Image: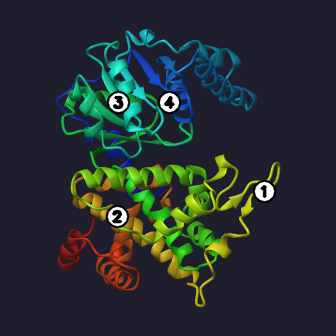
Amino acid sequence: MNEILKSQLDEINSGANRPKNVDQTSVKKLGVLGSGLMGHGITYVSALSEIEVVMTDSSQENADKGFSRIEDILHDSVELGRISQKNADKILNRITTTDNYNRLQDCDLIIEAVFEDRDLKRKVTTQAERIMDQNGIFASNTSTLPITSLAEKSIRPKKFIGIHFFSPVHKMKLVEIIKGKRTDDETIAKAFDYVLTIGKIPIVVNDSRGFYTSRVFSTYTNEGLALLAEGNHPQEIESAGKKAGMPVGPLAVIDEINLGLVARIRNQTREDLATEGKELPLLPSDRVIDIMTKTVNRLGRANGGGFYEYPENQKKYLWPQLQTHFPPAKNPLGQDEMIERILFIQAIETIRAYEENVVTSVADANIGSIFGWGFDSNKGGTLQFVNNYGIQEFEKKSIQLEKKYGERFKPPKMLKEMSSKKEMF
């Protein structure tokens, strides 16, 4: 890890964005609503850190399935010699599984990790808040829905916050803490201290659609889809993503996320903006999403296949019919230009998020990009990439990309001002 990155990580972990007027806090008993992919992971990392956890689900059977997944993680750790069976048993003994919300009675922190559906989240929030410790805080693990809107159904909106984990929870180091418009300092401090307690890296951001991490990460996947829509070979797109330093190519990532979910989030965003009298701009990626979800019904790995085929006990491979639906271009782009687009779109969107005060520090922006969605650590994070490229050169290249590929590459006002003053992030 280079010195700049280490310094920024130290800045975050020392509490630069933690409210200074609140004493140190601790979580006595955690409630987790939902035992699926995220819920059981949150339960595991919390119990591992000696926190008593009540993990709920809509049925005892579902809650027990989540518990079994935790047992599997611990079994692997014991087999690898990372922990003893005695310690594994202690961790499991800190977890209570239930379908009865009354067991949440003494919880001073509750994290909902249910399906990404606004109505369902509001329903479980109302149920749990009536039962939990009245001095406790309630958090949503949503990755896209604005915290302020979810807090509208809260009986204590000042004690409502976003605590956004990344999958798989037991491996990913970052946690994004999202302040709603009414979230108070005590709630921010308690969320921050909890994240440090479970050995994760906390970044604190202001509320916005997609927050910081989901908002910028989606530009990576959308750019991959745009490249496909233009007729670039899918294997070349995946290769460009990896050469840009991302851990997985954009098409493979979307298969894991699920295109059905991507489409639902996009459609929900459209509806939400329509109620505000706004429109969601059309992107080149929209045509790909519509063809994959509506025409060929290939939603991703969990649904049997998406951009890739997943034969049992064999290596995945790109769906052979992709180029039937997205015909090859006469003059496909070279790797260098694809890589440049992939890097630039993430950096430009980060600058916009910083300009809008969604992400409030350079350290949070860089560390969030590296530990949240896997931006190349050798580049120092999204804003450090701009510094290293040269801010004036970066602006010039952005203008060229805008002319060639559209407004999404338009240099933000902040970038133009910093370029004219020869400043750095």
User: Furthest-bottom residue in view?
Assistant: 330
Q: Residue at x 26, y 26 (%)?
A: 154
Residue labelled with disc 3: 122
Name the residue type under label 2. Answer: Glu
Q: Which residue is mark 1?
A: 315
Relative to the observer, which residue lies in front, 84 or 213?
213
Labels 3 and 2: the sequence-earlier one: 3
Q: Residues within 10 Å of mark 3 (few under 14, many from 20)?
A: some
First along the sequence among labels 3 and 4: 4
With respect to residue 64, does 344 lie above or below? below
Residue 327 in the image: state x and y as whole percent: 63, 80
Q: Amino acid at mark 3?
A: Arg
Q: Which mark is residue 160?
A: none
Name the residue carrying label 4: 42
Q: Nearer the viewer, residue 125 or 298?
A: 298
Say what amino acid the circle numbered 1 marks.
Answer: Lys
Q: Amino acid at mark 4?
A: Ile
Front-lying residue, 346 or 147: 147
Which of the two labelled residues, at mark 3 and mark 1, occupies the earlier sequence position? 3
Q: Earlier in the sequence, mark 1 or mark 2?
A: 1
Q: Quadrant of residue 195?
A: top left
Q: Earlier in the sequence, mark 1 or mark 4?
A: 4
* Viewer-side label of 3, 1: 3
Q: Residues within 10 Å of mark 4 (few under 14, many from 20)?
A: many
In the rendered image, which residue does mark 2 sit on?
Answer: 349
Q: Secondary structure at mark 3?
A: helix
Q: Are marks 1 and 2 in contact (CB under 8 Å)?
A: no
Q: Residue 183 appears at what percent x and percent y?
A: 22, 33
Q: Secondary structure at mark 2?
A: helix
Q: Residues within 10 Å of mark 2 (few under 14, many from 20)?
A: many
